[in-house]
Image (cartoon, rainbow, N blue to C red):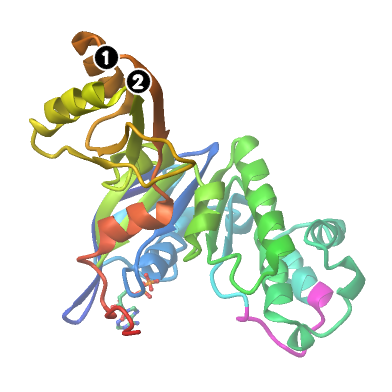
Amino acid sequence: MITLRGLTKRHGDTVAVDALTLDIEEGRVTGFLGPNGAGKSTTMRMILGLDRPTAGRALIDGKPYASLRHPVREVGSLLDAKALHPGRPARSHLIAQARSNGIPVRRVDEVLETVGLATVARRRAGAFSLGMYQRLGIAGALLGDPKVLILDEPVNGLDPDGVRWVRDLVRAQAAQGRTVFLSSHLMSEMQLTADRLVVIGRGRLLADTSMAELLAASASASVRVRTAGPDDLRTLTDRLLAHDGVSAEPAPACGGERNEIVVRGRTAGEIGDLAHRLGIRLHQLHSVSASLEQAYMELTEHSVEYATRPAKV
Ligand code: ADP
């Protein structure tokens, strides 16, 4: 488990991370999201003892990183895949890492096999593609068989096969009871990978929630409702619109179906109960969940440091 309590980092006037308090629990994949400059890397660096907090603390299983006896065996991390000596063969790089942490060399060959680099292990890392660098970085993170994994943009540069491989790997690690904390800008991928989400903007916590809760709370989550006839639809629509924060619009024509509306601001259960009280027969009641991308955009719209305008066409 990773524990953050009032974790803060200032660089002069810039508040990179602003009083983050949260727990990142074991047995789950926790996604870390936020616009560029939100403070994600700085937070990860403080957890890993690479940046000193201005205030607050970051603990791993109750201890600061600096006081861990065998850090690489307790926390595996990938921050910058390209931060290694380009002239050194991949295997030598991992062997050096293993030796300095009391890890047997046979573990190097195991992780090279796991990440799919066994056949190129004797090539210089400098000749690697970005995707291969990422695999090598993940091999380094796995080397000590740690209980906690912290991965900054691990799927950056990977092909679709590699992206799916990372997803399966981190999900398997979490299923074994490990703590997995990873960032990514690929929302559709994060939606498939993470159980929980921590979202920050301008250093501040915007959400610490399960994926399901975040998607359900999105303004773009909706319910499609079809009644038996137009009179029922009118009655139901009027009753729904009598409440603030509820919208009900005719559903876009689909397969010639009529008597159908799209409702926002009420759950399928609430609409079903209302229809029952009104004696209205429903022919369809279907929840349409928001995408993570939509939910994320709503959360972060006021926290984007480098805003863009829609392109004119
Ligand atoms: P993210 O990883 O979410 O893109 P960062 O943690 O890299 O965000 O940066 C958070 C903020 O802190 C940004 O405004 C960035 O410019 C600033 N920052 C990060 N590192 C430094 C540093 N060493 N000196 C000054 N400002 C920094």
Identify the mark at residue 228; answer none if there is no mark: 2
Q: Which comes sooner in the sequence, label 1 or label 2?
A: 2
Q: Secondary structure at mark 1?
A: loop
Region in magenta? 82-92
In percent of width and height, residue 158 lies at 67, 70
Residue at image position (81%, 85%) is: 124
In percent of width and height, residue 71 lies at 57, 56
Q: Residues within 10 Å of mark 1 (few under 14, many from 20)?
A: some
Instruction: Give the distance between the C-alpha atoms of the residues marked 1 and 2, in whole angstroms.
Output: 8 Å
Q: Nearer the viewer, residue 181 or 142?
A: 181
Residue type at mark 2? Ala
Contact (Cβ within 8 Å) of mark 1 with mark 2: yes
Magenta-drawn stretch contains 85: yes
In the image, residue 60 sits, relative to residue 160, either above or below, namely: above
Q: Secondary structure at mark 2?
A: loop
Main secondary structure type of the part rendered in magenta: loop
Residue at image position (41%, 57%) is: 293
Residue at image position (44%, 70%) is: 50
Question: Does the Cβ of the disc 1 residue fall within 8 Å of ligand 1?
Answer: no
Residue at image position (59%, 65%) is: 154
All told, the count of numbered labels is: 2
Residue type at mark 1? Ile
Q: Quadrant of the C terminus?
A: bottom left
Question: Does the Cβ of the disc 2 residue fall within 8 Å of ligand 1?
Answer: no
Q: Residues within 10 Å of mark 2 (few under 14, many from 20)?
A: some
In percent of width and height, residue 122 lies at 89, 78
Query: Which residue bears the numbered disc 1?
Result: 280
In percent of width and height, residue 127 lies at 78, 88
